[in-house]
């Protein structure tokens, strides 16, 4: 229930078209600044994790104490949920409403997103250029070209599950 409401709230933010950087590439904009402030992050910071925190807070179903203390950092999401045994690399355990992320172990920087749908692709196509597992995501600070952490808006996209992809079983929390 909470995970579904969370996804609907993230979708509302995407559909509003207001979660876009002004100017592009600045990590700033009226709604982006509000998202960053809600997560306690400095204005102009990368905002993928802050976007998820903002969406969770906007549902009214989560308390700040139920989420990472520094919700603007992907590493803090990882640590918080790993301490609760809710982090996995096994895509078969993942459900709609869970979170996916990648994290550089040296810099502790990464990117995080909400998962709307999982699909095992048996045939290569224009939409799915590689075989394997793919995720339909809702993510902030994203772009449609690559999987980097430097984007310009909140959007939905297809993202391939790779060896560095990990998951937070947020729907079980």
Image (spheres, rainbow, N blue to C red):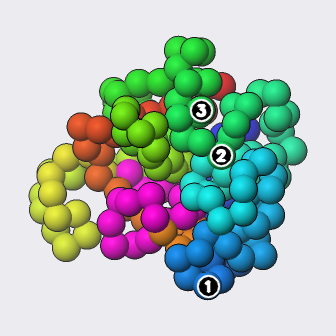
Identify the disc placed on residue 76.
3
Q: Which residue is mark 2?
A: 72
Q: Nearer the viewer, residue 138 or 149?
A: 149
Q: Residue at x 24, y 37 (%)?
A: 163
Identify the disc placed on residue 8.
none
Q: Residues within 10 Å of mark 3 (few under 14, many from 20)?
A: some
Residue 26 in the image: x percent, y percent? Answer: 59, 75
Residue 145 in the image: x percent, y percent? Answer: 34, 73
- Verify CB contact (< 8 Å) between mark 3 and mark 2: yes
Res. 31 in view: yes
Q: Earlier in the sequence, mark 1 or mark 2?
A: 1
Q: Give me the C-alpha separation between circle 3 and circle 2.
A: 8 Å
Element type where label 2 sits in the image: loop
Task: Find out whether residue 145 is within the magenta segment.
Answer: yes
Task: Find out whether residue 143 is within the magenta segment.
Answer: yes
Identify the disc placed on residue 23.
1
- Quadrant position of the N terminus in the picture: top right
Q: Residue at x 82, y 27 (%)?
A: 65
């Amino acid at each position: 229930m909470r995970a579904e409401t969370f996804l609907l709230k993230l979708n509302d933010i995407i559909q509003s078209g207001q979660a876009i950087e002004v100017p592009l590439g600045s990590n700033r904009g009226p709604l982006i600044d509000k998202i960053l402030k809600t997560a306690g992050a400095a204005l102009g910071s990368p905002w993928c994790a802050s976007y998820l925190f903002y969406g969770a807070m906007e549902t009214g179903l989560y308390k700040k104490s139920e989420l990472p203390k520094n919700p603007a950092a992907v590493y803090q999401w990882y640590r918080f949920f790993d301490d609760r045994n809710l982090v996995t690399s096994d895509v078969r355990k993942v459900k709609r409403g869970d979170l996916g992320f990648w994290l550089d172990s040296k810099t502790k920087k990464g990117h995080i997103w909400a998962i709307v749908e999982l699909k095992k692709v048996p045939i290569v196509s224009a939409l799915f250029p590689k075989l394997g597992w793919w995720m339909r995501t809702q993510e902030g600070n994203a772009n449609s070209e690559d999987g980097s952490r430097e984007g310009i808006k909140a959007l939905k996209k297809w993202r391939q599950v790779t060896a560095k992809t990990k998951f937070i079983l947020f729907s079980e929390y």
